[in-house]
Each structure stands twice: as C-alpha cells, then as structure tokens.
Amino acid sequence: MKRFVWLVPAIFLFCLTAKAQDTPAWEVAGGYSYLYANIGNSSGSSSFGLQGGGGSITENLNNWFGGRAEVNVYHGAEAGTTVSAVTANYGPVFSYRRSDTFTPWASAQLGIVHNSQGYLGTSASSFQFGFVTGGGVDIKVAPRLAVRLNADYMYSHFLGLRQDNLTFGGGLVFRFGHK
C-alpha cells in the first residue's frame, strides 16, 4: 500500500515534466505589422495608417511567463509626406499553454518610438517614450513552427499630445529548445 501512495505523486510529477517539455525555451518571430496612428488634439482627432514589419525574441522562463524584446518598423504617407516610425520595446509576456495547438498570450512592454521628420507633424526626427500592451494567439502548424496573430494598444506622446495607437500583425514563430 505504501508503494501505491508514492506512485500517485510520482506519476503526477512525471506528467508535469512531460507538459513542461512542450514549452519552448526560445521563440523567434517575424512578420507583417500595421500601425493605426491616432493624432490626439483638442479640435478632434485624425488618424492615418502605416504598414511595416518587425520581429521579436522571447525567452520563456517557464510554461506561462517570459520576457520579450520586439522591434517594428513602419512606413507610409501622412498628409502627403512620406514618414516612418520605429518602435523598440521590452517586457513580460504571459502565455496560457493548455492546448497543443493554440497558445494565447498577453504582454506589456516599455520602450521607445522613433519618428521621422513629418510624422505627426513634427519638424525633426525624435525619440519618445512608448508603451505597448496587448495580446494574440500562436497557432501551431508544425512541431517547431507556429503562426502568430496579434493586436496591441500603443501609447506615444509627440508634440505635447497623447497618441492612442493600435497595431495589428501576423507572422511566423520559430520555436527552439525545451523548458
């Protein structure tokens, strides 16, 4: 009977270990991104869209928590002027790994936004504080490959005005190692 009592926790421990092996140690992602920039001003708000792409690298510390560094580059036209913006952020990512196929996640990242001259009406390029929060889902298509869909809120502050921006994206995720 004593052996049976110890057998149940041992089986449970081995099951936890097997599930932990499904968590990749590293995830490298890249793909398309769209920035819906909102110019906040007192006379009403106007907006414009920029297209681009980016990439991220995530280190998963366990099956639900990790750290993500992300860079995105956007390019397009605003009020007849060609403009660009670059974001660079880092922060925690929280994953819900209960399905073998779908991994929903949420993140909150701090960083910078660099704009070109003409972006949001600026007279010169500059760096500003940026905050990005949002989430998405990774859809497994192969043992080490997933498709990522995401949507984020991005705060920026140019010309003394607050901008509440949205970003949407999709791409591929390459998974390496085991946790």
Image: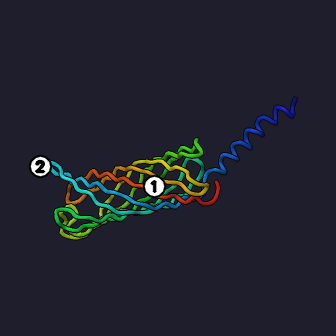
Residue, disc 2? 43
**Amino acid type of the residue tagged 2 in the rendering:** Ser
Residue 113 percent coordinates (x, y): 32, 62
Quadrant housing the C terminus: bottom right
Residue 1 quadrant: top right
| Quadrant position of residue 86 | bottom left
Q: Is residue 155 left or right of residue 178?
A: left
> Which is in the foreground here, disc 2 or disc 1?
2
From the viewer's side, name the closer residue of 90 and 36: 36
Q: Badge 1 local density, few (<14 within 10 Å), some, or many (20+)? A: some
Q: Which sits earlier in the primary sequence, circle 2 or circle 1?
A: 2
Q: Residue 53 is drawn in which quadrant?
A: bottom left
Lateral position of residue 178 relative to residue 90, left or right:
right
CB atoms of marks 2 and 1 within 8 Å = no
* Foreground of the two, 33 or 115: 33
| Measured Cα–Cα span from mark 2 to mark 1 | 34 Å
Q: Amino acid at mark 1?
A: Gly
Residue 97 drawn at (x, y percent):
57, 44
Residue 115, given in percent of the width and then of the height, sits at 28, 66
Q: Position of residue 31 (x, y in %)?
A: 43, 61
* Number of other residues with Cα within 10 Å of mark 2, as a class: few under 14, some 14 to 19, many 20 or more: few
Which residue sits furthest top? 1
Residue positioned 26% across, 69% down in the render: 116
Q: Residue at x 21, y 61 (%)?
A: 120
Residue named by callout 1: 91
**Which secondary structure lies at badge 1?**
strand
- Measured along the vertical axis of the image, is residue 6 above or below residue 106? above
Instruction: Please report the residue visible at 54 percent of the width from the left and 43 percent of the height from the top.
Output: 96
Residue at 50% from the left image edge and 45% from the top image edge: 104
